[in-house]
C-alpha cells in the first residue's frame, strides 16, 4: 500500500519467460489479487490448524501444522512483496532481471523447508506422501518421510543456490 501512489493506473500482471510484460490490468486489480492471496493464505492456515487440531485427543496445537502454516504464510507474503516490487520496477523502467531469481529462490526455500518438516510428519490427510502404502503401515510412512525429507531438503536448497549461478 505504501507504493500505491507511485504506480500508474495500468500495471503489468503477467510476464513471459524473458521477463517481458505481456498482460496489463488496473492497479486496483493487482490490489484485489494480492488481497485475495493474503486472505486465502490466512484462511488456509487457520483451516489447516483447526482441522489438524480437531483430530487430536487433547486440545494442544499440532506443532507441525502450526509451523507449516507459518512457513506458508511467510512464503506467500514474500512472493506478494516481490510481485509489488517487480511491478514498481517495471513501471519505473528499472531492471527486473534478478527478481525472477529471487522468486525462484523463495519457492525453492519453501520446498526445502517443507522437506525439512516432512521428517516429523505423522500420518495425516493434509501433508506428506499420502499413498495407500504409506497409510497402510506406520513404519513405511516413517521411512518414506525420513528419506523424502533428505531428498527434498537437499534438492531444493541446491536449486535455490544454483539459480544464481546459471544465467
Image (cartoon, grey):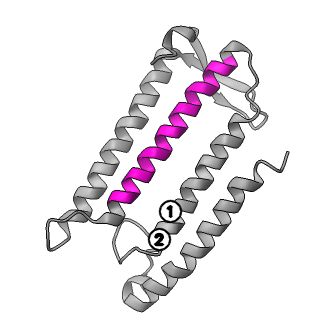
Element under disc 1: helix
Magenta region: 66-90
The answer to whether mark 1 and mark 2 are in CB contact below 8 A is yes
Q: Which residue is mark 1?
A: 114
Q: Residue at x 63, y 42 (%)?
A: 103
How many other residues sit within 10 Å of disc 1, few (<14), some (14-19) or many (≥20)? many
Coordinates of residue 163 in the picture (x, y in percent) = 75, 50
Q: Which residue is mark 2?
A: 118
What quarter of the picture does the N terminus occupy? top left
Instruction: For residue 86, say whether it is visible.
Output: yes
Q: Residue furthest left?
A: 58
**Residue 71 magenta:** yes
In the depicted structure, whether residue 112 falls above or below residue 2 = below
Element under disc 2: helix
Disc ID at residue 82: none
How many numbered callouts? Answer: 2
Is 95 placed left or right of 65 in the picture?
A: right
Coordinates of residue 107 in the picture (x, y in percent) = 59, 50
Coordinates of residue 116 in the picture (x, y in percent) = 52, 68
Quadrant for residue 153, please give it: bottom right
Q: Distance from label 1 to label 2 (Cα)? A: 6 Å
Instruction: For residue 13, say whether it is visible.
Output: no
Amino acid at each position: 500500500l505504501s507504493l500505491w501512489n507511485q504506480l500508474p493506473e495500468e500495471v503489468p500482471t503477467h510476464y513471459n519467460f524473458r521477463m517481458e510484460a505481456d498482460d496489463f490490468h488496473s492497479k486496483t486489480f493487482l490490489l484485489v489479487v494480492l488481497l485475495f492471496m493474503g486472505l486465502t493464505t490466512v484462511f488456509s492456515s487457520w483451516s489447516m490448524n483447526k482441522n489438524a487440531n480437531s483430530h487430536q485427543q487433547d486440545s494442544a496445537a499440532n506443532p507441525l501444522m502450526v509451523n507449516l502454516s507459518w512457513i506458508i504464510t511467510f512464503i506467500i507474503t514474500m512472493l506478494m512483496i516481490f510481485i509489488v516490487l517487480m511491478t514498481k520496477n517495471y513501471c519505473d523502467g528499472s531492471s527486473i532481471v534478478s527478481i525472477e531469481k529471487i522468486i525462484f529462490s523463495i519457492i525453492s526455500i519453501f520446498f526445502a523447508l517443507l522437506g525439512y518438516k516432512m521428517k516429523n510428519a505423522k500420518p495425516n490427510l493434509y501433508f506428506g506422501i499420502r499413498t495407500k502404502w504409506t497409510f497402510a503401515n506406520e513404519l513405511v510412512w516413517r521411512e518414506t518421510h525420513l528419506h523424502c525429507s533428505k531428498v527434498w531438503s537437499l534438492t531444493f536448497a541446491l536449486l535455490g543456490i544454483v539459480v544464481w549461478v546459471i544465467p
